[in-house]
Image (cartoon, rainbow, N blue to C red):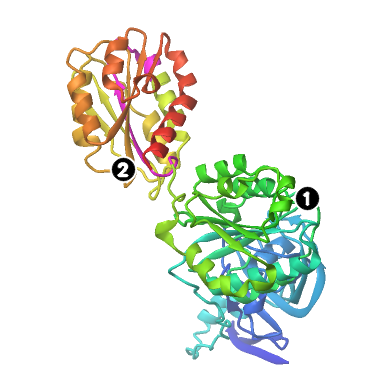
């Protein structure tokens, strides 16, 4: 046992303040929100958690007793020992165990885990060290104690690896867990996946990998942020249990596309999304619709087929073109065939090289994250203040459909009467909320209608500085222009701007078609009432995506 004693002079008396600790250091060891139980060297130690760890995507496995891969501070909040302000907590290292239970407590959702090699539990320190108590700290200051040499703090074990910085992908491994593959081939598949992720060199600043099992119903085993260290990831793969059931690969692709790459599950903004789908034999369900959704969501789907059906088995295959329909693009790059699970080793390196080939991931760019959309808004007197707000609501509905960010799509706006006013440029706002708030806050000008001059102004000013995506201009007007629109519209389209014309009330159809891109019918919209604008949002978004796909 160690004792810390301080003599404090107080009204002519000396008071002995004593603080007794166990075998752990008397000075709490500062840690971060990301520090795990496995990162600590001591078997029993008091750590000092920073504030606001609840704002992190903490990973916690278990209830009461936590797997050592858990974040300590997140587990302390889950246990009810700490609040948002952080503070000290005692960590007790324990042996590994089976069946860590999941639960929700104090704003933290812990996850279940079938087995882990080490554990820890947490308690509140009985005696808070002197340095952490404000009242005693004041007394020490008043006693004018001589300065002490700083206490050397125990170091946190540095075992973290950065990973392959040339392969900063978010990768979903969708493995076959059907009855068809059987336990033996399932184990061979796990070995193959483990070797593949080892070759990828997973790490904090490298690729992140999560895993989904495809069977009758898909199941996410772990997300992108659960295991960012190779040793932990390989152990998690080793512990996977075979599920059995149908080979519903289409369901698994859809499940992964809808839920897996969110920021809550560890998806990183700006990092390419890759889905590696392994199939033993052939799928039980249809892949086409799910794969199309994945492509439109910016996910690069690779299909690894092992033991493809032989000619006499083809009659049992629901769709013989499933491999072509499943992948990001049917160009040979995204399809990979392995004859047998017994001969996978030689395929690990070439497949890992494909997954890390950034320039070849054609599906990373989509219409939702790679377009620049300019809004050219009629602010003439005939519109009126109330209808002008309906126009802004309509345009906000369009903007809301796109992934607006500093690395994604951009929007900008020009309002016009006889004059033009740049409301905000394409690079002014880097988040969707900021951009839409700016759009809805545009003040109404009122005046005449000179649409041709406004198109020239937007071409020269709004699209002078853009992001790397394709350029679109949506013109909304309620009347006839006092100047020519055909010449300015043709000049804009010559510069690579695709134009949509939306007319309301008295806008002549001839003028609208003169402004819009080819084919005119799919780029021209008209409604008698401003309240009818909202109905055009889905068609305009689909049109922009169609134009983007046809030109990419």
How many C-alpha atoms fall within 10 Å of the one at disc 2: few (<14), some, or many (≥20)? some
Q: Nearer the viewer, residue 297 or 482?
A: 297
Is residue 199 positioned above or below 154 on the image? above
Q: Residue at x 55, y 85 (%)?
A: 153
- The quarter of the rendered structure image containing the N terminus is bottom right
Instruction: Name the image quarter holding residue 511.
Output: top left
Q: Residue at x 66, y 46 (%)?
A: 250
Please provide percent x and percent y for residue 52: 57, 60
Find disc 2 in the rendering and name its residue.
Answer: 428
Span colored in magenta? 367-388
Find disc 1 in the rendering and name its residue.
Answer: 246
Q: Residue at x 38, y 19 (%)?
A: 521
**Disc 1 versus disc 2: distance between alpha carbons?**
50 Å
Relative to 57, 165 lies left or right: left
Q: Nearer the viewer, residue 510 or 139?
A: 510
Tally of numbered discs: 2
Please provide percent x and percent y for residue 152: 53, 88
* Secondary structure state at the residue bearing disc 2: loop
Q: Residue at x 47, y 88 (%)?
A: 147
The mark closer to the camera, 1 or 2, is: 1
* Secondary structure state at the residue bearing disc 1: loop
């Amino acid at each position: 046992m160690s004792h810390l004693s301080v003599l404090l002079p107080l009204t002519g008396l000396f008071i002995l303040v004593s603080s007794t600790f166990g075998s752990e250091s008397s000075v709490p060891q500062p840690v971060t929100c990301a520090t795990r139980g496995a990162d600590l060297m001591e078997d029993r130690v008091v750590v000092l958690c920073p504030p606001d760890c609840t704002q992190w995507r903490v990973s916690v496995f278990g209830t009461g007793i936590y797997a050592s891969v858990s974040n300590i501070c997140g587990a302390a909040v889950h246990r009810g020992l700490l609040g948002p302000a952080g503070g000290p907590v005692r960590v007790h290292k324990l042996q590994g165990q089976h069946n860590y239970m999941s639960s929700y407590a104090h704003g933290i959702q812990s996850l279940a885990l079938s087995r882990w090699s080490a554990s820890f539990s947490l308690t509140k320190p009985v005696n808070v060290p002197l340095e952490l108590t404000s009242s005693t700290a004041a007394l020490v200051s008043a006693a004018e104690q001589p300065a002490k040499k700083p206490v050397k703090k125990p170091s946190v074990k540095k075992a973290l690896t950065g990973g392959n910085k040339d392969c900063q992908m978010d990768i979903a491994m969708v493995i076959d867990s059907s009855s068809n593959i059987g336990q033996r081939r399932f184990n061979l598949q796990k070995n193959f996946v483990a070797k593949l992720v080892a070759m990828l060199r997973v790490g904090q600043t490298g690729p992140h990998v999560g895993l989904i099992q495809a069977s009758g119903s898909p199941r996410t085993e772990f997300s992108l942020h659960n295991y960012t260290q190779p040793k932990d990831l390989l152990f998690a793969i080793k512990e996977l249990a075979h599920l059995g059931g149908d080979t519903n690969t289409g369901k698994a692709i859809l499940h992964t596309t809808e839920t897996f790459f969110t920021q809550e599950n560890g998806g990183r903004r700006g990092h390419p999304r890759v889905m590696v789908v392994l199939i033993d034999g052939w799928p039980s369900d249809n892949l086409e619709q799910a794969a199309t959704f994945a492509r439109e969501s910016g996910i690069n789907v690779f299909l690894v087929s092992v033991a493809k059906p032989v000619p006499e088995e083809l009659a049992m295959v629901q769709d013989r073109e499933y491999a072509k329909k499943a992948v990001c693009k049917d160009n040979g790059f995204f399809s990979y065939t392995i004859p047998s699970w017994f001969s996978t080793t030689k395929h690990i390196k070439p497949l890992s090289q494909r997954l890390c080939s950034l320039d070849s991931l054609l599906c990373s760019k989509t219409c939702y994250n790679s377009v620049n959309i300019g809004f050219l808004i009629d602010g003439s007197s005939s519109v009126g203040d109330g209808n002008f707000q309906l126009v802004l609501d309509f345009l906000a509905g369009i903007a809301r459909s796109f992934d607006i960010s500093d690395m994604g799509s951009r929007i900008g706006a020009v309002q016009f009467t006889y004059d033009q006013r740049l409301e905000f440029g394409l690079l002014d706002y880097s988040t969707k909320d900021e951009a839409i708030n700016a759009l809805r806050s545009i003040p109404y000008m009122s005046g005449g209608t000179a649409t041709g001059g406004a198109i020239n102004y937007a071409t020269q000013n709004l699209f002078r500085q853009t992001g790397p995506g394709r350029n679109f201009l949506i013109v909304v007007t309620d009347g006839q222009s006092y100047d020519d629109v055909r010449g300015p519209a043709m000049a804009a389209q010559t510069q690579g701007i695709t134009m949509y014309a939306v007319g309301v009330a008295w806008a002549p159809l001839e003028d609208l078609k003169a402004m819009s891109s080819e084919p005119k019918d799919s780029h021209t919209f008209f409604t008698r009432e401003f309240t009818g604008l909202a109905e055009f949002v889905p068609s305009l978004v689909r049109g922009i995506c169609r134009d983007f796909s046809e030109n990419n």
